[in-house]
Image: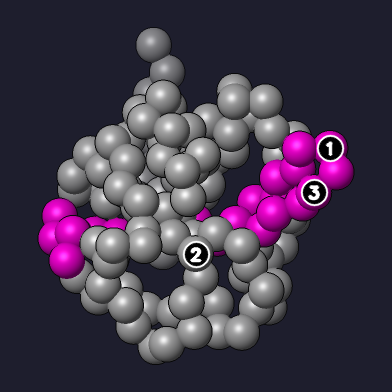
Amino acid sequence: MPVKNIKPKSSSIKHYKSLSYETLTASWLLNDGWDVFMPMIDHGQKTDIVISDGSEFYRIQVKSLESNDESMLVDNRWGDAEIDYVVYFSRTGNWGYIARPFSQRKKKLNSPDNVRFHQHPKHFVRAFESI
């Protein structure tokens, strides 16, 4: 059995967790038939994933939250970057939300225009199709 002998730095662990949610989102979208592209670097563009149905492309920002409070305020972390969707994952709960980007500084996560999903591929895809 493999043994991990070195504990990563906390800054690395934070990056690994973020990347794991991006990869999970990409996997679920691939399984649903989307073409999925992951930019090497997303600084400035604020795009973690690009998906396509063959003719249209959509830019997605993925965020994970260290909270189980669905009514929390989330920050606009993309500024005026032209993204199409924001996917939020709770790290402490088994749920998430899919949202359209918003221009105000903060917004309630469970706003009526955001779509909640259970962290399961079928639930995620159903939520994504309804946004």
Q: CA distance from mark 2 to mark 3?
A: 17 Å
Q: Which residues are magenta?
A: 49-71
- Counting from the top left corner in percent of width and height, residue 110 is at 24, 62
What residue is disc 3 on? Answer: 56
What residue is disc 2 on? Answer: 100
Rendered position, 82 above or below 62: below
**Is disc 2 in contact with disc 1, using a CB cutoff of under 8 Å?**
no
Front-lying residue, 83 or 91: 83
Q: Amino acid at mark 2?
A: Arg
Q: CA distance from mark 2 to mark 1?
A: 21 Å
The quarter of the image holding the N terminus is: top left
**Is disc 3 in contact with disc 1, using a CB cutoff of under 8 Å?**
yes
Residue displayed at 15% across by 55% down: 68
Residue displayed at 55% across by 59% down: 85
Front-lying residue, 98 or 20: 98
Q: CA distance from mark 3 to mark 1?
A: 6 Å
Residue displayed at 52% across by 47% down: 22
Secondary structure at badge 3 equals loop
Q: Tag 2: Cα neighbours inside 10 Å, few (<14), some, or many (≥20)?
A: some
What residue is disc 1 on? Answer: 54
The part of the image, by quadrant, that contains residue 61 is: bottom right
Q: Amino acid at mark 1?
A: Gly
- Counting from the top left corner in percent of width and height, residue 52 is at 75, 43
The part of the image, by quadrant, that contains residue 73 is: bottom left
Chain-order first, disc 2 or disc 1: 1
Front-lying residue, 27 or 12: 27
**Is disc 2 in contact with disc 3, using a CB cutoff of under 8 Å?**
no
Residue 130 is left or right of residue 123, and the answer is right
Secondary structure at badge 1 equals loop
Q: Amino acid at mark 3?
A: Glu
Q: Is residue 18 visible?
A: no
